[in-house]
């Protein structure tokens, strides 16, 4: 049994919703470690609520305050200069007695790591470089990168070659110090046997294109809506379902109205964990016009239900999707729309891509992913 401690800004108990992709990633890793018989401890914030200590499904959760919690109603200001991460990591460092572990996974900038003496292997988790798209990003992302550069784990793990190359340049990491371990998917939770009849009754029985994610500029939902307008001009019995929330929600709703697509585009908002697999099951195609994905867990979740993917051939997306759909080489509305139309019109092509998705996703079970982290620990321990 390996004792594994994960320091992460959010953990999905008692609720989810701050960084949904990161939350599902850590939750999945925990399930994988537990299935392999290892002990897991989580050290996190109060961002998702909770108490200072809780045992959740035999996972010990410890929560520490950061500047967001200390400031109360003014807590949003703590995101400036990434002071929330800085104060949280300092608080954890002052309580380092909790870090009696074998394998320490660090899921946020942690510049005080060098102050902690411990007989453990430390691994920093990388996701994607944060683009600057507004003033808030300009006042936070550069500081997060500085704190990240000051974080000195034994190894870094990136979920894709694309992300690894980004951070090798950004953090000046030596190639020997970085490993590539993809994210995974819960194949028990996401499977083809899910009954989506209640979702279909609510959304309608037309064929459906699904998007799941944050309504943020780099997710390209505005591009997806404009491409869908072209799809709708050629195929009548199809709807676009958008699951998620974010800063562009009102802009996207107004865009939908301007294109006279209010009856054809459904904004489902934030969907609970229990309902989410049903939305995947109800759709025919999963489409994302995202231009920046450090990995793209949403693609795996859709593939686990045999749904072909339409996305751009950019960033880490081809590493995840492979040939389980159509990857568009050019940022072009018509070409993106044509990829969707092709899958809707040609049943043989659709079934071929669906089967490839089901076969490929088996490579990404959380047990297989968790095992790769444990192997890093075993190899280093042998050398010691």
Image (tube, rainbow, N blue to C red):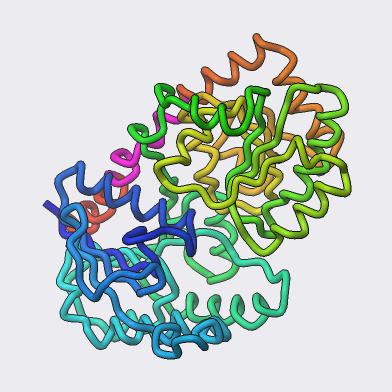
Quarter placement of the C terminus: bottom left
Q: Tell me the residue at 79%/47% (across/down).
A: 223
Would residue 329 be found to the left or right of residue 302 on screen?
Answer: right
Q: Is residue 266 magenta?
A: no
Q: Does the magenta stretch include residue 363?
A: yes
- The picture quadrant where one finds residue 326 is top right
Q: Where is residue 154 in the image (x, y as percent from the top left)?
A: 33, 67
- Tell me the chief SS of the magenta region: helix
Q: Is residue 176 visible?
A: no
Q: Which of 314 and 377 is in front in this view?
A: 314
Please give the range of residues in magenta. 360-371
Would residue 22 be found to the left or right of residue 341 on screen?
Answer: left
* Number of marks in picture: 0
Q: Tell me the residue at 36%/58% (across/down).
A: 12
Depicted 348 relative to depicted 344: above or below: above
- The picture quadrant where one finds residue 341 is top right
Q: Tell me the residue at 24%/76% (across/down).
A: 52
Q: Nearer the viewer, residue 28 or 377?
A: 28
Depicted 303 relative to depicted 3: above or below: above
Depicted 78 relative to depicted 344: above or below: below
Q: Where is residue 333 in the image (x, y as percent from the top left)?
A: 84, 39
Q: Where is residue 351 in the image (x, y as percent from the top left)?
A: 59, 14
Q: Is residue 366 visible?
A: yes
């Amino acid at each position: 049994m390996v004792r594994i401690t994960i320091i992460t800004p959010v953990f999905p108990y008692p609720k989810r919703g701050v960084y949904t992709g990161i939350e599902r990633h850590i939750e999945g890793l925990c399930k994988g470690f537990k299935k392999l018989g290892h002990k897991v401890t989580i050290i996190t914030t109060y961002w998702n609520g909770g108490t200072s200590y809780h045992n959740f499904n035999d996972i010990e959760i410890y929560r520490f305050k950061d500047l967001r919690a200390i400031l109360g109603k003014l807590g949003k200001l703590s995101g400036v200069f990434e002071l929330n991460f800085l104060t949280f990591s300092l608080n954890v460092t002052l309580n380092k007695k909790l870090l009696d572990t074998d394998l320490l996974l660090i899921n946020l900038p942690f510049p005080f790591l060098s102050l902690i003496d411990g007989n453990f292997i430390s691994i920093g988790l990388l996701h994607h470089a944060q683009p600057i798209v507004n003033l808030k990003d300009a006042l936070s992302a550069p500081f997060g990168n500085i704190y990240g550069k000051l974080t000195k784990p034994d190894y870094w793990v990136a979920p894709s070659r694309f992300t690894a190359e980004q951070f090798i340049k950004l953090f000046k990491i030596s190639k020997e110090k970085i490993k590539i371990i993809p994210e995974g998917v819960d194949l028990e939770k996401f499977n083809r046997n899910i009954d989506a009849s209640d979702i279909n009754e609510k959304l309608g029985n037309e064929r459906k294109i699904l998007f799941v994610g944050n309504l943020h500029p780099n997710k390209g939902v505005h591009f997806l809506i404009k491409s869908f307008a072209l799809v709708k001009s050629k195929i009548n019995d199809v709807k676009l379902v958008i699951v998620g929330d974010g800063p562009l929600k009102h802009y996207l709703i107004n865009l939908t109205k301007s294109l006279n697509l209010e009856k054809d585009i459904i904004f489902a908002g934030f969907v609970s964990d229990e309902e989410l697999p049903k939305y995947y099951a109800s759709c025919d195609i999963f489409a994302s016009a995202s231009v920046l994905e450090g990995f793209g867990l949403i693609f795996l979740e859709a593939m686990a239900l045999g749904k072909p993917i339409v996305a751009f051939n950019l960033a880490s997306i081809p590493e995840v999707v492979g040939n389980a759909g159509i990857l568009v080489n050019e940022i072009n509305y018509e070409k993106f729309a044509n990829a969707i139309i092709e899958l809707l019109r040609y049943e043989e092509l659709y079934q071929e891509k669906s089967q490839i998705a089901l076969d490929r996703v088996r490579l990404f079970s959380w047990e297989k992913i968790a095992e790769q982290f444990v192997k890093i620990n075993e190899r280093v321990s042998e050398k010691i």
